[in-house]
C-alpha cells in the first residue's frame, strides 16, 4: 500500500511539474478593475498582446469595473492559482484600499502574489496660471502663511491624487483644503479653470493645459525628476522629505501560483517591455515601461501600504 501511495504521489508531482513546463497551454485572462480607456486598461492590453505573441496563446483582457476595484480583484483572488487568471492592479486596489475601507472582499497582501510592475506614470503638482505662487517654494510659503486657504482638486476621496497631496501636507507641515471631483479629468479641468488653486495629476492628462499655459508645473511627486519635464524639481528637492509616489500598474496572480509560472511571466514581460514598439505605445500615452523583479515589486508594495496606512489614519480619511 505504501508503495502504491508513494507512486501515486510521485505521479501527481510529475504531472504538476509537466503542467508548469507546458505553461501556457490555453488562454490566459487578465482582469482589469476599470472600464476601457485609461492607463490601467492600456497596460493590460499592451502586455496582453505581447504575452499572446511570445507565449503562443490567446490573452483575454476582461474589464470588470466598479466597486472601487472590488469586483475584479475579488474574482482574481478567488481564481485557480494556475497562471491562467491574472489581475492588473494599481495603487488603489493594492496599497490604498486595505487601509481606506474597514472591510474589503479580498486581502490585497494575502490573496495575491506579484508578477511584475508594468508601467509608471509621473504625477505632478500643478497650479492655476493666476495663482500668487509660481514655484514650489512659494507655494509652501503661501500655504504656511494662511493654513487652509489653498484648495486642491482630486478624482475623489481615497484616490492617489487625494493621498499624494495629503502626504505632501503631512511631510511639509502645511494645511490645504481638499475639493473632490468625480474623476481625474474634472479634477484637472478644475485647476485649469481656476475653480481650485492646485492639483496633483498625471503629467500626460494635464499636458494640454500645460501647453496652453492654463496651469504651471510646480513639482513632481517622484523621488527623481521625470523625463517629460526634467526642469521640474521634486518635492523632496523643494524641502518636503520622503514623498515618492506615481501612478503605476502591476500584474498580479492568485496566491499559490507556482514560482515557475510566475518567473516565466516575469521574464517574458521584461522582454516585452524592452521592445521599441511597445515602449513607444506606452510612452506616447504618457506611461513609461516599468519592468521589475518580483522581489522589487514586493518591496514597493510593502513600502506604499505602510505609507498610505499612516496617511489615511493621520488625516482621518474614510471611504464615503
Image: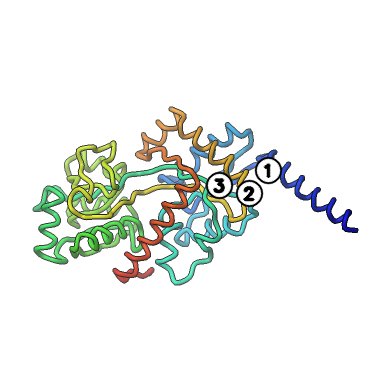
Disc 2 crowd rating (10 Å Cα; few below 14, some 14-19, many 20+) is some
Quote the CA–CA distance across marks 2 and 3.
17 Å
Would you say the residues marked 3 and 1 are in contact, meaning their CB atoms lie under 8 Å apart? no
Residue mark closest to the camera, 2 vs 3: 2
Where is residue 244 shown, x and y percent of the image? 31, 51
Residue mark closest to the camera, 3 vs 1: 1
The quarter holding residue 68 reads bottom left
Quote the CA–CA distance across marks 2 and 1.
8 Å
Near-viewer residue (218 or 31): 218
The residue pinned by badge 2 equals 258
Q: Is residue 122 above or below residue 33?
A: above
Would you say the residues marked 2 and 3 are in contact, meaning their CB atoms lie under 8 Å apart? no
The residue positioned 20% from the left and 44% from the top of the image is 233
Where is residue 209 shown, x and y percent of the image? 22, 43
* Mark 3 or mark 1, earlier in chain: 1
* Mark 2 or mark 3, earlier in chain: 3
The residue pinned by badge 3 equals 30
Label 3: element kind:
strand
* Mark 2 or mark 1, earlier in chain: 1
Count all numbered tags in the image, as a single digit.
3
Label 2: element kind:
loop
Where is residue 246 shown, x and y percent of the image? 34, 49
Would you say the residues marked 2 and 1 are in contact, meaning their CB atoms lie under 8 Å apart? yes
Near-viewer residue (160 or 174): 174
Q: Pick the quarter of the image with the C terminus.
A: bottom left
Where is residue 146 shown, x and y percent of the image? 10, 65
Left or right: where does residue 301 sit relative to residue 210?
Answer: right
Label 1: element kind:
helix
Near-viewer residue (206 or 241): 241
Name, please, the residue furthest toward the front.
Answer: 2
Left or right: where does residue 310 sit relative to residue 78?
Answer: left
The residue pinned by badge 1 equals 20
Amino acid at each position: 500500500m505504501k508503495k502504491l501511495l508513494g507512486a501515486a504521489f510521485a505521479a501527481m508531482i510529475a504531472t504538476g511539474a509537466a503542467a508548469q513546463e507546458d505553461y501556457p497551454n490555453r488562454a490566459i485572462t487578465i482582469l482589469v478593475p476599470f472600464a476601457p480607456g485609461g492607463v490601467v486598461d492600456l497596460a493590460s492590453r499592451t502586455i496582453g498582446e505581447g504575452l499572446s505573441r511570445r507565449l503562443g496563446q490567446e490573452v483575454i483582457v476582461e474589464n470588470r469595473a466598479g466597486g472601487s476595484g472590488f469586483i475584479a480583484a475579488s474574482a482574481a483572488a478567488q481564481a485557480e492559482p494556475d497562471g491562467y487568471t491574472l489581475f492588473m492592479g494599481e495603487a488603489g486596489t493594492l496599497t490604498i484600499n486595505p487601509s481606506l475601507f474597514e472591510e474589503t472582499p479580498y486581502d490585497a497582501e494575502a490573496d495575491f502574489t506579484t508578477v511584475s510592475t508594468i508601467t509608471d506614470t509621473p504625477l505632478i503638482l500643478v497650479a492655476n496660471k493666476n495663482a500668487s505662487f509660481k514655484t514650489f517654494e512659494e507655494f509652501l510659503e503661501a500655504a504656511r502663511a494662511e493654513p487652509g486657504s489653498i484648495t486642491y482638486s482630486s478624482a475623489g476621496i481615497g484616490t492617489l491624487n487625494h493621498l499624494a497631496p495629503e502626504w505632501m501636507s503631512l511631510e511639509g507641515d502645511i494645511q490645504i483644503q481638499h475639493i473632490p471631483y468625480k474623476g481625474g479629468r474634472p479634477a484637472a479641468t478644475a485647476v485649469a479653470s481656476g475653480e481650485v488653486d492646485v492639483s496633483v495629476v498625471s503629467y500626460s492628462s494635464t499636458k494640454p493645459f500645460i501647453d496652453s499655459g492654463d496651469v504651471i508645473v510646480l513639482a513632481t511627486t517622484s523621488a527623481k525628476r521625470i523625463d517629460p519635464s526634467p526642469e521640474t524639481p521634486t518635492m523632496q528637492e523643494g524641502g518636503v522629505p520622503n514623498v515618492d509616489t506615481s501612478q503605476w500598474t502591476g500584474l498580479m496572480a492568485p496566491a499559490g501560483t507556482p514560482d515557475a509560472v510566475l518567473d516565466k511571466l516575469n521574464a517574458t514581460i521584461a522582454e516585452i517591455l524592452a521592445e521599441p514598439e511597445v515602449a513607444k505605445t506606452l510612452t506616447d500615452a504618457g506611461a513609461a515601461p516599468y519592468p521589475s523583479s518580483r522581489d522589487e515589486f514586493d518591496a514597493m508594495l510593502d513600502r506604499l501600504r505602510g505609507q498610505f496606512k499612516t496617511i489615511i489614519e493621520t488625516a482621518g480619511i474614510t471611504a464615503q
